[in-house]
Image: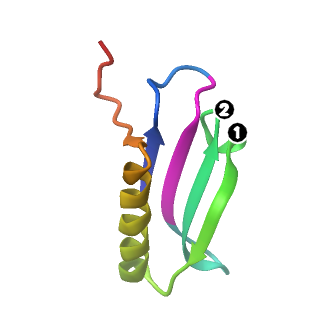
Amino acid sequence: MIQAFYQTNPVQDTPYRELVLEHEEGKGWHVLLLGGTKWGARGATTVSDDPVADFDNGKIVFDRIFEELRGHGWRAYTPYETWD
């Protein structure tokens, strides 16, 4: 699961957060919060990395961080939005 967030209309080199719930071979399940200004995995730094037991526990952590981001003014990005 991946969700990107922005605070100002996304254009090149604007701040963003990316929330990821993933499973890696040898590392297990974890919830990553990435951030930066260069959109994409190569431009991101790790803000937090929370190991979790499984997908269900990861979903709980993912949802909690999702709501915390929204509470701090971050908006979930969807490619279908327009910024008129």
Front position in the image: 71 or 84: 71
Looking at the picture, the colour scheme in use is: rainbow
Residue bearing mark 1: 43
Distance between mark 1 and mark 2 Cα atoms: 5 Å
55 left or right of 22 in image: left
Instruction: Tell me the residue at 71%/41% (across/down).
Output: 42
Q: Position of residue 12 (x, y in %)?
A: 59, 20
Q: Secondary structure at mark 1?
A: helix
Magenta part of the chain: 13-21
Amino acid type of the residue that numbered disc 2 sits on in the rendered structure:
Lys
Q: Position of residue 82 (x, y in %)?
A: 29, 19
**Magenta residue check for 20:** yes
**Can you tell which quarter of the image residue 24 is in?**
bottom right
Say which quadrant the N terminus sits in: bottom left
Instruction: Tell me the residue at 48%/25% (across/down).
Output: 10
Say which quadrant the C terminus sits in: top left
**Magenta residue check for 25:** no
Instruction: Tell me the residue at 68%/56% (across/down).
Output: 46
Q: Is residue 50 above or below residue 1?
A: below
50 left or right of 73 in image: right
